[in-house]
Image (cartoon, coloured by chain):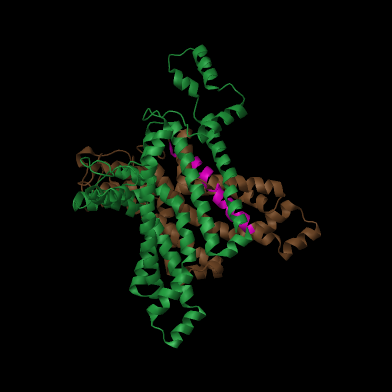
Chain colours: A green, B brown
Amino acid sequence: MLLFVIRRVIMIVPILLGLLLLTFLMVRFGGGDPAAAMAGDAATPEQIAAIRDQLGLNDPIIVQFWTYLKNALQGDFGVSVYSNRPVGLDIIQRLPATLELTFVALLIASVFGIVFGTLAGVYRNSILDHFVRVTSVAGLAAASFWIAIMLQLIFSMELNILPLRGRLPGDIPAPTAITHFYLIDSLLTGQWNAFWESFRHLILPAVTISLGGLATIARFTRSSVVASMQSEFATYENAVGYPKRRIVFPYVLRNSLVSPVTQIGLLFGAFVSNAVAVEAVFDWPGLGSYLVAAIFAADFNAILAVTLVIGAVYAIVNILVDLAHGFLDPRVAERM
Amino acid sequence: MPILRKLLADIPALIGLLIVLFAIVLSVYPDLLIGHVENPNKGNILMRLQPPSDKFLFGTDDLGRDIFMRVVLGTRSALTIAVVVVVLSMLIGVPLGLIAGYGNRYLSEGIMRVTDVFLAVPQLILAIAIAQILGRGAESAMIALAVTYWPFFTRTVYAETQAIKSSLFIEALEGLGASRARILAFHILPNIAAPVIVRATVGMGFIILTAAVLGFLGVGATLPDPDWGLAISEGRKYLPQYWWYATFPGLAILVLVLGFNLLGDGLRDVVDPRLRRSR
C-alpha cells in the first residue's frame, strides 16, 4: 500500500512539468512579442532589442524555460496588466473564494445526489424515480452560466430573497482571516451576521455549480443501488423478512457508495470549469472571475498562471481521489 | 438493421434522435421555420425589446431583431462548431490512440504522457487560454476546442485497442504476416468504431456547451453573429424587465445538448451492453 501511495504521488511530477512546458510554449510562441508590447508603439528597434536582452528573450530556449520554471515554482508569474500587481499575489488572495465555493458545491452535489439517487434506486420506476432521471438528464444538458442567470432572475430580481452578487454585502467587513473561508472564519470568531450573510451569498452560485455533478452522482448512486438491491444478499434479507429500511441503510448503501464516491473527486475539474463563468455572473471574487477579467484585459501572464494553478490543484485532487479509491477498494492499489 | 431497431425502441434515445435530426434540418434549411431572411443582423429599432407575441414568438432583442429567427439561425452556428471540433479531434485523437495502443512501447508511452498533460487541466480553462492566444473569433474557438478535446478520443481508442490487441484473430493476422498498418486500419479500427461513435455523440453535446461558455465569455463567436452563448451575454444586460432575451437562447442550448446526450446514452446501451444503464 505504501508503494502504491509513493508511486501515485511521484506520478504528479511529469504532469506538472508537462503543464509548465505547455504554458511556457504558449507564452513564448503564442502571445506575440512581449518586448515590443513592453516598449510601446514609439520604441525604436534598438530599444526593443535592449528590452529583449533584458528579459532574456535572446537566451537559448532551454535557458528561458529553466528561468520560467524557477520563477513559476517560486510563485512568480510576472505582473498582471489588469490589476497591476504580481499575478501570484492576486491568485493567492482569490483562490480561497473559489475553493470555498467549489467545496460547498461538492457538498451539495454529494448529499443531494446520494439522497435522490438512493431514493430513485430503492423506489424504482416510481414517479420520484422518473422525476430524478428526467431532471438529472436535463441538469447535465443546461449551460451553467445560463442557469446562474435564470436563478438570479428568479430569486434575486423577481422574488428578491437572495443576494444578486458578491461574497458579502458592502457594509459587512470580511471576518477575521483564519482559513480564508468566510463560513468557517465567521463561525470561529462568532461573527454571526457575517456567517448568515456569507451563507446567503453562497447559495445561488454553489447550487448552480453543483447541478451537473448532482445529476452525475444521482445517476451513479441510482444504478449501483439498483444493482445492490438485486444482489443475492438483499433478496435473502428480503425473504427472511427484514423491513426495507433495515436492508437499505446498513447493507445496500454501504455496498453502493464506492463508485459514486470516486466520481465525486473526478467532478472537481468540472466544478472548477463551471465556476469560471458562474463566478463572472455572480461577481464572486475568485479565480474564475479573475480569469474572465484577464480575458477582457488580454492579460496573458494572468491567464496562463490561472491555467497552471488550476491544473496543479486538479492534478493533486485527482491523486487524492486515486488514493481514496485505493483505500476503499484495495484491489485497485494492487493493480498499480 | 438490428442496431437501428433497438435504438428506435428506446424512447429517450428516439427523442434524442428526433431532436438531433430536427436541428440538422434547421441548420441546413432554416427557411422552413422562419421564412426567407435577407439579413439576420438587420433589426427594426421601432420594435426593440418587444415581449413574446404571435408575431415574435420569443420577443425581440435590443436592436429589434426577432429572437426566434436568431435562435433558429444559431442552430447552424452551434452544430458547425460541434461537428468541426469533433471531426478535428477525431482526426488527431484516433490515429494517436491506435498508435499508442498498438505500436512500439516508447512511442506509446510518449503519446499517453502528452495526453495526460492535456487531461490534467479542465478542458474549458485550457481552451480559454488557447483561444485567447489565437485571437478572438469562432475559428480560434474551434481550434482551441479541438486542441483540448482530442485526448478524450486518444484515451478511448487506446483503451479499446489495448483490449483487443491480444485477441486471437490479431495474433493470427500477425502470424500470417500482415503488416502493422494493415492490421490497424482494416482489423482494429472497425472493431473499435462503436465506442468512438458513442464518444463522438456525447462529445457533440459537450462541445456545444463549452463553445457556448466561450461565446458567453467573449472568446468565441463575435457580434453580430447569431450565436446562443453570445446572445445570452447580451441579453443579460436587459434583465429583469426583458427576461426573454437571455432565456430563449439558453433553452435552445438545453434542448440540443439534451438531444445529443439522450442519443449518446441510447447508442451506448445498444453497442455496449456491458455499460447498459439499469432500468
Give the main secondary structure of the magenta stretch: helix
**Residue A184, position as x, y percentages in the image:** 32, 50
B150 falls in the magenta region: yes
Q: How many marks?
A: 0
Rendered residue at 36%/67% (across/down): A116
Can you say whether A224 is above or below A270 in the image? Answer: below
Location of the N terminus of chain B (image quadrant): bottom right
B175 falls in the magenta region: no
Q: Is residue A57 visible?
A: yes
**Residue A218, position as x, y percentages in the image:** 41, 64
A118 relative to A319 in the view: left or right: left
**Residue A106, position as x, y percentages in the image:** 39, 55
Q: Nearer the viewer, residue B246 or A62?
A: A62
Q: Nearer the viewer, residue A278 or A261?
A: A261
B215 relative to B126 in the view: left or right: left
Question: For residue B237, what is the image quadrant?
Answer: top left
Question: For residue B183, what is the image quadrant?
Answer: bottom right
Q: Nearer the viewer, residue B97 or A86?
A: A86
Rendered residue at 58%/40% (across/down): A18
Q: Residue furthest bottom?
A: A240
The magenta region covers: B137-160
Can you say whether B21 is above or below B240 in the image? Answer: below
Q: Residue furthest front?
A: A189
Q: Is residue B78 visible?
A: no
Q: Residue furthest right?
A: B176
Can you say whether A293 is above or below B123 in the image? Answer: above
Location of the C terminus of chain B (image quadrant): bottom left
**Residue A160, position as x, y percentages in the image:** 19, 51
Q: Nearer the viewer, residue A25 or B208?
A: A25
Rendered residue at 43%/34% (across/down): A88
